[in-house]
Image (cartoon, grey):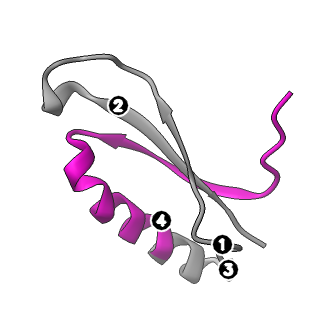
Amino acid sequence: MIHDGKCVEILHVGSYDNEPSSFEQMDRFAQDNGLQRISDCHREIYLTNSTKANKLKTILRYKVN
C-alpha cells in the first residue's frame, strides 16, 4: 500500500516536455490555498502508453503541508 498523505495533483495531458506548465498550475493552486510543497520530489503516474504526445495522460503529484 502506498500512502502519499496530503498532496496536490493534476492530470497532465500532452507531451512530457510541457509538464512545467502543469507544475506551475499546481504551485499556484497550492499557494492560493495556503499549502506549502514539502520537497522537490514528485510522483508521476502514467495512465497511457501512446506514441502520440498529444494523447499522453499523466498524474503529477507532490506532497504538501
User: Considering only order in the chain, which callout, 3 or 2, is on the residue closer to the N terminus?
Assistant: 3
In the image, residue 20 lies at what x, y percent?
A: 31, 63
**Residue at disc 4, secondary structure:** helix
Q: Residues within 10 Å of mark 2 (few under 14, many from 20)?
A: some
Q: Name the side, left or right, on which 51 lies relative to 60.
A: left
**Residue at disc 3, secondary structure:** loop
Asked if the magenta segment contains residue 23, the reply would be yes
The residue at which mark 4 appears reads as: 26
Q: How far is disc 2 from disc 4 in space, using C-alphas? A: 16 Å
Tell me the residue at 36%/19% (across/down): 48
Q: Residues within 10 Å of mark 3 (few under 14, many from 20)?
A: some
Q: Residues within 10 Å of mark 1 (few under 14, many from 20)?
A: few
Say what amino acid the circle numbered 2 marks: Lys
The N terminus sits in image quarter: top right
Tell me the residue at 31%/54% (across/down): 19
User: Considering only order in the chain, which callout, 4 or 2, is on the residue closer to the N terminus?
Assistant: 4
Task: Please state which of the two labelled residues, at mark 2 or mark 1, is closer to the viewer.
Answer: 1
Tell me: residue 37, above or below residue 2: below
